[in-house]
Image: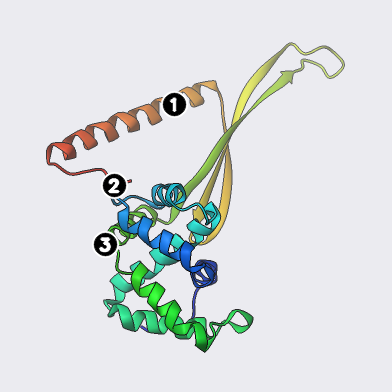
């Protein structure tokens, strides 16, 4: 399936690749080429930011997200890289005011061909794809603690209080950012802590098993 249009969430990354100065692009490419181990998006962003001073963290993240999407598309379609890059350039020329001028097309294609020939980045994109191949993915969480007085009668002093906790969970569903709330009492909070601790123990056990097979954790 050819690239008819670029999804809105990836356009900023491709536009930033196009607009990078020559020196910043070279620094980005050289840093990605030296990346020692395949890792997830957050780790690669941190590595690039340490090696490239002229590009902001937000810009690096936008660029890598766009590249990861293209690596995934390339893997699914099994299209030759040059064909894929040519289709991307044509799609970039249909972005209205942000369209890629004919005079910049050759340079943009050269940059994309270079960025799509990095084995480490290809593996990193697969790591993130596997992490996100679920209906909902975790983003952040927070626990809010409330103390509520208990009254025997409205016109009298409280006879005591109850403590409750509200767990707020933020997550992504496809491209949507969502959240939900769950109320917990102290026993339920303790139970949740035990569940998380058991998960950590299981993860450590599985990691130990795979390391005996000389496999590295890619995160």
Which of the two discs, 2 and 3, labels the residue nearer the N terminus?
3
- Residue 158 in the image: above or below residue 9: above
Q: Pointer 3: residues within 10 angstroms few (<14), some, or many (20+)?
A: few
Q: Report x, y in % for residue 17.
A: 48, 69
Q: Disc number at residue 218? A: 2
Q: Report x, y in % for residue 79.
A: 28, 79
Q: Report x, y in % for residue 191.
A: 44, 25
Which of the pair 183/38 is nearer the observer?
38
Which quadrant is the N terminus positioned in?
bottom left
* Quadrant position of residue 19: bottom right
- Distance from the alpha carbon under mark 1 to that under mark 2: 26 Å
Q: Pointer 2: residues within 10 angstroms few (<14), some, or many (20+)?
A: few
The residue that label 3 is drawn on is 119
Which of the two discs, 1 and 2, labels the residue nearer the N terminus?
1
- Report whether residue 96 is seen: yes
- Residue 39 in the image: above or below residue 88: above
Mark 2 lies on a secondary structure that is loop
The residue that label 1 is drawn on is 193
- Residue 75 in the image: above or below residue 165: below
Residue drawn at (60%, 79%) of the image: 98
């Amino acid at each position: 399936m050819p690239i008819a249009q670029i999804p809105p969430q990836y356009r900023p990354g491709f536009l930033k690749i196009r607009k990078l100065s020559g020196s910043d692009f070279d620094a980005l490419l050289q840093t990605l080429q030296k990346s020692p181990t395949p890792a997830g998006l957050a780790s690669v962003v941190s590595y690039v930011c340490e090696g490239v001073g002229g590009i902001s963290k937000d810009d690096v993240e936008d660029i890598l997200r766009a590249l990861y999407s293209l690596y995934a598309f390339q893997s699914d379609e099994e299209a030759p890289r040059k064909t894929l890059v040519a289709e991307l350039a044509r799609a970039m020329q249909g972005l209205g005011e942000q369209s890629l001028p004919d005079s910049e097309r050759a340079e943009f294609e050269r940059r994309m061909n270079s960025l799509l020939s990095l084995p480490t980045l290809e593996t990193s994109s697969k790591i993130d794809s596997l992490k996100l191949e679920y209906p909902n993915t975790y983003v952040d969480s927070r626990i809010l603690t409330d103390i509520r007085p208990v009254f025997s009668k409205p016109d009298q002093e409280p006879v005591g209080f109850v403590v409750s906790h509200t767990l707020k969970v933020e997550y992504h569903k496809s491209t949507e950012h969502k959240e939900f709330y769950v109320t917990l009492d102290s026993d339920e909070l303790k139970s949740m802590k035990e569940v998380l601790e058991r998960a950590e123990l299981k993860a450590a056990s599985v990691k130990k098993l795979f390391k005996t097979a000389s496999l590295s954790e890619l995160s």
